[in-house]
Amino acid sequence: MTAAAVELTPRLRTWSAFRRNPLGVASAIVLVLLALVAVCAPLIAPFPEGYGADTSQPPSAAHWFGTDDIGQDVFAQVVWGTRVSMAVGVSASVLAIVIGLLIGVSAAYFRRLDTPLGVLVDLSLSLPVLPLMILVAALAGPSVRTLAVVIALFSWPEVARVVRSQAIAIVPMPFVSAAKVVGGSSLWIVRKHLLPGVIPVVGVSVVLTTSRAVLAEAGLSFLGLGDPNSWSWGTILHKAQQSGALATAWWTTLFPSLAILLLVVSTTLLSVAYNDARDHRNSS
Amino acid sequence: MRRGVLLAALAALTLSAACAPSVPGSSGSSGGQQPAPSDRLTIGTTADVLNYNPLVGNSRTDSWVTNLMYPHLTQMDMTGKRVPYLATEWSYAEDGKSATVRLRDDMKWSDGKPVTADDVVFSVMTVKKENFGVVAGLITALDEAVAVSPTEVRFDLTRPDGTFLDNVGFWLPVVPKHVFEKAPSVQKFANDSDWVSAGPFKLTKVERGQRYVMERVDGFGPGTPAVKEVVFRVFPDVNTEVLALRNGEIDVIGNVLPPATAAELKNDPSVKQEQIPSLGWAHLQYNVKRKPLDDVRVRQALAHAVDYEAIRNIALKGYAKSSNSSVLTPSLPEWADPASKEYTFDPALSKQLLAQAGVSDLSLSMIYDQADPNIARWAPMVRDSAKQAGITIKLQGLERNTYVDKSLKHDFDIYAGSWAIMDNPPANLGLAFKTGGYINYGQVSDPKLDALIDQAQKALSVEEAKPPIQEAARLIRDQVYDNVLYVETFNVAHNTKWTGFKPMPSELLSIVNPLSLAAAKPAG
């Protein structure tokens, strides 16, 4: 109704609404900074390995985040942890989105597939995710790749469900019927009409799935299923817990936890801000 | 049940009240209700008792509880030498084909019947017949056990075996024949109620997931225990146990403290730590059937690429001793070989050895149990020091069952682990290094080593067994069939309110062994 009245493209309007939300902008900046830290880790701190004489030192000028029980710098661990945590988060989320999109769109467009795929999604959603993740990760052996795949395998159903509900509203639209009438192939219709319609929800999904994947990675690594050859925030927590110094060496747990908190809060705020900005009915 | 919980809550309340600074004018504890602290010794553990049948059970908590109920023939002193418990004297015949054990005559089962030679014979013969548990693998030489008199047992052996008495004495719990023989299969007998026991304490109440209450046995042979009641309380992990100890909720932490916790608790005046030597050792084993690990120079290169000192000082916080790269550890001074020298940490020498062997770009994977906190801490240190010698080690921290499975199937390049209890070198080296031995993970097969171990096992005294076993240990060191990193010094914490514990080696015995708990008494 209102769409016809305003000349601005929807994308520009969303952008201008988003810019006016300070929380959203701040979150975006935090995420960009975290991404920068992940990419530039080698420039910021040396890879944490080996061992030193300064064990379990509280934060100081030499060691900003203190040192752990074998004398490694916690700051370096957190910096390098950002890399693995975000890499696992992003790749797991991309994988989950691809699977979710495929299944969601097919369920909406090919009506005959709707029921079986719906059952599959419901089934996957009702699985006890954590124990299964632990089982699969334990059987497959700990590595960064395993973690990403395992997390993706258990995160796609939510994406699929969101995509399907959005797509199912588009399928009966006149322009889809028109495309069918002029003889467009299913693939072409899905590509040209269905996908553009669901991309905005997917945008939000990407961000949220990433943050969930980062949390899942931290959880699995904390349980000792992380890759022992690399550092992630969960691995730092796991090592802190294992050293038995949780109660005294607070710096070994505080900083990685803060990093996780920062990432999850900013992704959540970002997606909320984006959603609000996209919903033009609210922006006066 | 409910009353028990209430009582525990009440005890906790009064205890915390005792710890809190007293408020003037509110003399609440008007006598009477507070249980005398000397009446109960509470021990923290991290697991429930899963098996009450001492012949089967093998978890640590299982052993701690059942050890207080079922006597063994012997215990050991701090140097690993056997000391009397149910047995007073033991010896081999001249030809080594039989062994005789004399028993105390003052031990009674809790139903009033005496503990006799028949019970010992029944216990050992049942294990042999049904072939189960740890003991079965250690008594392969046994032919027949005979009760010569109520206080004398004779073991007839098929071959001279100088390890037999040590093994049977230490590992075999003696169970009441008149109770266990009623079970169609002793191996499957749960023994989970109406216990008939003969140790210093008897199990009277079980609250799964909460606590196990054991009452003192008056007239216990070696001396009536000073403390009336021993309670095992179940906690989720060592961290919570430490908090409980500091709050005065428990008196002893059964589990070994992680080195970092031990270092931190050192400054707490209300906690005393007993240093308990480990009977095992932490080590790296190389799969000698895999190329290029079949070349002794490659194994030596690996041995020179480990910073042993750093592992002991940093990962173990100094709570570990060097074993001089020998499988005869300082915990058993009777056997140890003072001439053995530890491999030096020398990456340059490693590189040289690798070059001699014609190996370049050596890349190996190393498996370990991700849940073992000590190993998880030093595994990356092994990787990083090897890197200095140009060797790439890829860590594979595995979930425990996968790890055990891979070890038994010899599916690894390097195995990082630790052995818990190696109390008798001739017997244990046989299991670990003889061709086809049950825990010979590295697939060592060396006829010379086999012969030396056989010779040591036949010897009937330490003096006689020592030369061949020391030579075997030197062979194991020089050929790097095993790379011994350290022998851990366990720290077991208890409240300073208690004293008189009799520490024994290994975490199985430590200060919660029956003779120690029977001797424990309130301080001051």
Image (cartoon, rainbow, N blue to C red):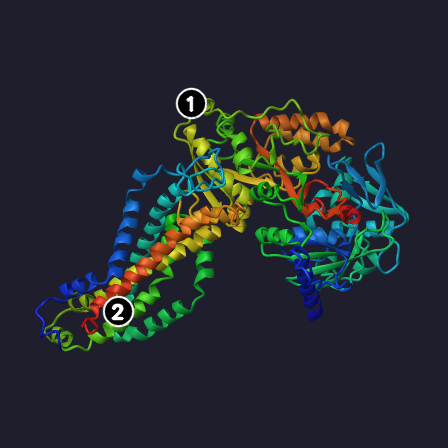
Closest to the observer, A256 or A153? A256
Q: How far apart are labels 2 and 1 at the CA level?
A: 60 Å
Q: Is residue A96 visible?
A: no
Q: Are marks 2 and 1 in contact (CB under 8 Å)?
A: no
Q: Chain of mark 2?
A: A
**Residue highlighted by disc 1:** B355
The amino acid type found where label 2 is placed reads Ser
Residue B384, image x, y percentages: 44, 34
The amino acid type found where label 1 is placed reads Ala
For label 2, the crowd category at 10 Å Cα-Cα, with few meaning under 14, some 14 to 19 and many 20 or more, is many
Residue B205, image x, y percentages: 74, 63
Residue A138, image x, y percentages: 47, 53
Q: Looking at the figure, which quarter contains the N terminus of chain B? A: bottom right
Quarter occupied by residue B434: top right
Q: Is residue B113 left or right of residue B468?
A: right
**Residue highlighted by disc 2:** A106
